[in-house]
Image (cartoon, coloured by chain):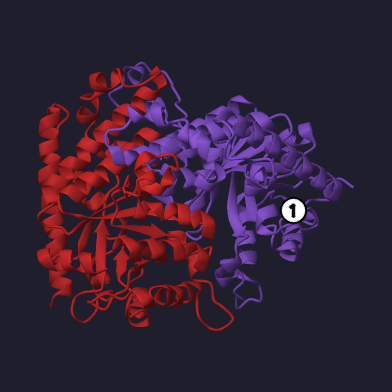
Chain colours: A red, B purple
Amino acid sequence: MDRLIEAITNVQNPSVVGLDPTEALVPPQVVASFAEEVRDSVDSPEELPAAQLAVAYFEFNRTIIDAVADIVPAVKPQIAMYEALGPAGVDVYTMTCEYAAQQGLYVLGDIKRGDIGSTAAAYAHHLSGVGADAAAGDDAADNGESIIFDPWHEDAVTVNPYLGTDGITPFVDAAVASDKDIFVLVRTSNPSSSELQMLDLADGTKVYEHVADLVEGWGAETRGQHGYSRVGAVVGATHPEEGRALRKRMPHTFFLVPGYGAQGGTAQDVAGMFDETGSGAIVNSSRGIIGAWKKSGRYSESMSADQALELVAESARQAAIDMRDALRFAVYR
Amino acid sequence: MDRLIEAITNVQNPSVVGLDPTEALVPPQVVASFAEEVRDSVDSPEELPAAQLAVAYFEFNRTIIDAVADIVPAVKPQIAMYEALGPAGVDVYTMTCEYAAQQGLYVLGDIKRGDIGSTAAAYAHHLSGVGADAAAGDDAADNGESIIFDPWHEDAVTVNPYLGTDGITPFVDAAVASDKDIFVLVRTSNPSSSELQMLDLADGTKVYEHVADLVEGWGAETRGQHGYSRVGAVVGATHPEEGRALRKRMPHTFFLVPGYGAQGGTAQDVAGMFDETGSGAIVNSSRGIIGAWKKSGRYSESMSADQALELVAESARQAAIDMRDALRFAVYR
C-alpha cells in the first residue's frame, strides 16, 4: 500500500474519484458528437448505441482525469458501468485505466471479483498481467524472453470475501509479485449490506467483524514501510461507528471508504476511519465529482459538446477541491 | 427457470459443461496454429500471447460445444478464464456464449458479480442487454424504435450475495423482464468456503443457511410452471449433507452444483440435491469434460492441430456421456 500512501501524501488529499459513468452523467451533446465516428466501427445497427456511449465514456473520463490529476492521488473506475455496454465498454474501462496511469494516478479497479482458488488465480491476472508463457507456441517464449502484457492497467482491485481464503490468496500473491494491492469487502455502504454483514455470530461478534479479522490476517505478511499491508478493506462511509471500531480492530489494514457525498457520508462520518497520523484511509466520491456539472446551474442543452465538457471539467475540479478541503479539515487536524 | 428445466428434460441429462479454458487445457499445437493469424491483429508484440490464446480458446470451445450440443442442455463459461487475457479474452467469452446459444444450448455465465444496488443495476445488463435508449443522440431512439443489443448472450448469470437484497433485486428484475435466471452463491465447493459460510449464527443457524433463506425469498415472486423460481442457488457437490438439507430448506430454488469430478464430487454426492421427481438441480463439470483428452492416453505432441481437436472432441463427448449416465443412474431411479 506504500505507493498509494505516498501518492496521498504528495497531494495531501486522501480522496479518490470514482469514474462510474452512466448515460445520465454524460452530457447528451457529448454522446451525440460521436454518432458519425462509431457508425463505421460496428457490425450491425443495434450495436450503435453501446458503441457510441462507450466512446463518449472515454472522452468524459479523460476530461475528468485531466481536470483532477494534479489534486487527487487516485481514481476508481467501477467496471460494472463499462460491462453494461458489453465488450466495447470493457475496452473503454482498460483505456480509462491506462490513461489515468499515464497521468500519474493510482488506479483502483472496482471489480469486486471473487471465486474459488483456481478461478481466483485467473482473475488475479488483473494485477499480474499476461506473461509470455501464456502462449506455448510463441517465439518469444521459446527464446526465453519474459514479455509481460498488462491489459488492465490497475494498481489495485476490490475483492469479495464470501469464498474464503483460497479465493483471496491468488490476489495477494499477484499483488506481492507486482507491487500492487487489493481491497476486500468488509462493510459495504449500501442499505441492505446489514442483511448479511451485521448478523450476530454465536461467538458474540458480527459477520463483518469476523471478515475484518480474516482480512487483517490475509495481509499480515505483506506490510509495507508505512505499516499498512497490501490487503485493504472496503468500509462504507455510511457506517461511521463501525468504521471507527474497525480502525482499531484492523491496525495494519488500509481502508477504501465509499459512500461519501451522493450516498450520504460526510467528512465527519469518515474522520474516525483514519489513524492518529491522518493516514489509513482513502475516501471515494463518484457522482459527487463526475456529476457535479449537473448541479452547477450552468448547464444548457444549447451548449456544444466542447462547452459541455469544459463545464464537466470545471465542475469536477471544484467538487474535488471542496472534497479535499473538507477531508483535510476533518482529518488533518 | 422453466427454459433450463425443459432443456434438461429434452436430453434427460441434468449436467452442464463448464467452458473454463486454461493454457494447460488447450493442446499446444492448437495454440501454435494461430500464430500467423493474430500477428497482424495486435498493436504491439507483447499482446501476441494473449491474442493467440484467446483465438485458440474460441476454437477449443467451439470444438467442445459441437461435440456435446446434442447430449447436454447447457454450458457454463467461467468469465475469469477469459478476463485473464484482457479485453481480447472478454470478446471470446461473448463469442463463446453466442456460439453456444446458436447451437441451442442454455448459457449460464459464471460471472459471480455482486455490488451495491445502483452498480448491480449496471451488471444486470448482462441479462437485459443494452436498449436503444442507451445513446440519447441515436436516431433510432429518436424515432421511438426499441432496438435491444445483447452483447453477452447469457441465459443466466451467477451472483454473489455478500451485499444483500439491493445488490440482488436488479438482477431479479432483469431476469423477469428478459425470461432469464440467476444463481446466487450459497455454499461454494472450495475448501475454504467454510470460513465464512459455515459460521454459527447466534440464532442457531449457519451463515449459508441464512443466505439460503434469503435466496428462497428473493425468488418467491418469480416461480415458473415447474415450481422453481428464477433465483437459483450455487451449492457445491463437495457438501452432500448440506446439499440434501438445503434441498428441503429451499423447495422452490433450483441448484447449480459445481465441484463434480475434478473437485471430488460424485454422482452419489449430488443425488440428494435433486427433488423426488429427479428435477431441481444441474451439475457442472469443467476439467472433467474439457480436459478429458489429457487423460485419454491417446494424445501425442506429434499430432496436427486438427488431430488434437478431434481428440478433444471425442474425449469430451465420451466424458459428457459418462457423466450423463452416472447422473441418470443416481438421480432418475
SS of the residue at dot 1? loop
Q: Which of the 4 image quarters holds residue A96?
A: top left
Between residue B138 and residue A164, name the one nearer to us.
Answer: A164
Between residue B236 and residue A281, name the one nearer to us.
Answer: B236
Residue B176 lies, in percent from the top left, at: 58, 38
Judged left or right of residue B48, residue A136 is right
Which residue in the structure is indicated by mark 1? B251
Image vertical order of residue A94 relative to residue B143, above or below: below
The answer, for residue A125, to whether it is visible in the render is yes
Image vertical order of residue A292 relative to residue A29, above or below: below
Q: Which residue appears farthest toward the right when viewing the image? A: B333
Residue B20 lies, in percent from the top left, at: 55, 45
Residue in the picture at 22% in, 58% down: A16
Judged left or right of residue B207, residue B266 is right
Residue B199 lies, in percent from the top left, at: 59, 74
Residue A89 lies, in percent from the top left, at: 35, 36
Image vertical order of residue B4 relative to residue B245, above or below: above
